[in-house]
Image (cartoon, helix red, strand yellow):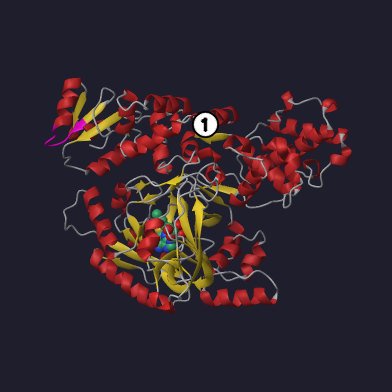
Amino acid sequence: MTAPETSKPVEAMSRDEADFELRVLAAQIEKHDKLYHQKDTPEVSDADYDALRRRNEALEEAFPDLIRPNSPSKRVGAAPSAGFSKVRHKKPMLSLSNAFSDEDVTDFVARIRRFLSLGEDAPVALVAEPKIDGLSASLRYENGTFVQGATRGDGTEGEDITRNLQTIGDIPKTLPADAPAVFEVRGEVFMGKAEFRALNQRQEEAGKKIFANPRNAAAGSLRQLDPNITAERTLHFFAYSWGEVSEMPADSQTGFLEKLKEWGFIINPMTKLCDGSTSALEAYRSIGEARAGLDYDIDGVVYKVDRLDWQDRLGMVSRAPRWAIAHKFPAEQAETVLEGIDIQVGRTGALTPVARLTPITVGGVVVSNATLHNEDEIQRKGVRIGDTVVIQRAGDVIPQVVRVIEEKRPADAVPYDFPDHCPVCGSEAVRPEGEAIRRCTGGLICAAQAVERLKHFVSRDAFDIEGLGAKQVEAFYEDGLIAQPGDIFRLKDRAEEISTREGWGEKSLTNLLAAIEDRRNIGLDRFIYALGIRQIGQATAKLLAANYGTLPALTSAMLEASDPESEAYASLINIDQIGHSVATDLVAFFHEDHNRAVLEDLENELEIETFVRAVADDSPVAGKTVVFTGTLTTVSRGEAKAKAESLGAKVAGSVSKKTDFVIVGADAGSKARKAEELGLTILSEEEWLTLIGANV
Ligand code: IVH
């Protein structure tokens, strides 16, 4: 934006323009300073950096009264750290899928057996570990020395909290000589319950913030810019996993934990090796019984496949490994009075009833709202306003109304009539047959939908614009600063207006504008996800990005696909995991003129990067479309598919002219015949394995 060579001459600048440019320059220079000094990853050449500084000087010379207290000209080298610098995780920090019942756990083991093509009763050894309710951290050791510690962040990029982690006694600062040269240990930072109570007492006496629970207290303590404050609060660390390692010291999860213990880490003492789901469930129950007596919070039990070669083969789906699952403890419940029902209108127009409750503490957190899901749910539960209800809260999920306590129903309790018009824009709200959700038909004229779409657009897994959270989006929308996504990228033209708003200091505004500039380059998968199309989550957005590569290609394919007889529609459906229902929502989105206008507007503001698959260039199947049919003998269909995808292939569900390879297992039927008719390359399982180099 302010490339020096294209900037206006200083003499021609107005005071306002100069003021704005100085703000932006300060943010840019600070960013490059950080990249250079703190992360050793400069993004601009020395010459370009010098040009930014010269431009700053020239502007300051011409407008000396605009020299900012934090002007880059007053600083040399690294900016005083305004926050934590970012750390890219060499291996992503994953999350876990959840199990809520015994059956979910036996299903988990059955899935593993199927994926690995094991027999139905084959033993699958699992490690059961308590799920610690803290914050995960990654500790990096190089040649035996603790050199860097990071938060999980979004799983790909976290914050550098090395100095804070150094204050934790449980974390070894050096490792013995037999530890690998590069060794990243992952685990949970947490605060004990006794320490939590003592801390809150100290906070209260000092008139400072009270923490709601030990987890928040641990988070607050770890994210102190001054590590001396972290050091005053006793935090602990249980180690349970790893990131980048130059050499794996074990071939099982238990062996790995043993090594960690030997090297001075603390392993949770309730960790247990189990020979299958039955004994894993026993471990779950005994850990559950011990729970109340522990000095730290746990919210479930994590089961992990013990064999690391199996973990490798199982890999992951979306952001969670196939080889682990978190079995949650039942939610905590409490009784309170339902004072009213509000209707929330979501991004896609869904009307969700929300119970307004007399505030009550459940599991250490004050709850004053709970979801009622939809209108049938209100009917089914027979909820009336004024009723005493049981609510529950589990982990991070939204609290729910479980049931009504009818004996406590007051005589004047009022049944609830679900609205048939949107409470925000007044448009009709309709409920298609067979669906549980009533939706506002207002589309773009509905302020609620527009705001929710904008919130989604800037959210963490989408554009992830720091400084532009839900609250700011609401306020900006209300005051007409942003109405549609593209407006975000024109906020710099409204800097003056924003700076007069409450809560917007010079620094926060400059940071916001810099954060927005930072996002003008965006990956196609994130971009698609950010659009908030119904049913298009991160995984599907990635699939679409991988299959179409660029936004224009996707757009024109979706437009062609509005004819269900078209080849474009057939190819869309042929993408594994995309069915008619998802396809219909996609096509409908691209068909709407106003959505295409939003896309065009964004294309003018952004550099949308072509999707590049993260695979080795030498993969023989990168970019190829493959179809598996029939029964495979060496691996399951699921494993074969996951492997093909990891090598950059697209796996399709049916055979067409565009298929590159059809891999035919035993008893293959119509797909194999069709492949022959079309003259496609047909491979046996053996030939496929040879092609991908797995048959050696
Ligand atoms: S394993 C791929 N083990 O739970 C391995 N996680 O819901 C991923 N957590 O982000 C983590 N105790 O913060 C693992 N024994 C344990 C854990 C544990 C707590 C947390 C961790 C993770 C979250 C996932």
Residue 3 in magenta? no
Give, as a three-letter code, the residue at label 1.
His
Front one among 247 and 431: 431
Q: Which residue is mark 1?
A: 594
| Outermost residue to the left | 667
Residue 667 in magenta? yes
Quarter of the C terminus within the rendering? top left
Front one among 260 and 488: 488
Can the viewer see residue 274 in this picture?
A: yes
Front one among 147 and 49: 49
Residue 197, position as x, y percentages in the image: 57, 77
Please report the bounds of the magenta region as a residue range.
Answer: 663-669
Q: With 104 as the anchor, is 157 left or right in this view?
A: right
Q: Residue at x 26, y 43 (%)?
A: 638
Q: With 77 as the anchor, is 288 left or right in this view?
A: left
Can the viewer see residue 263 in this picture?
A: no
- Position of 407 relative to 548 (above/below): below
Q: Secondary structure at mark 1?
A: helix
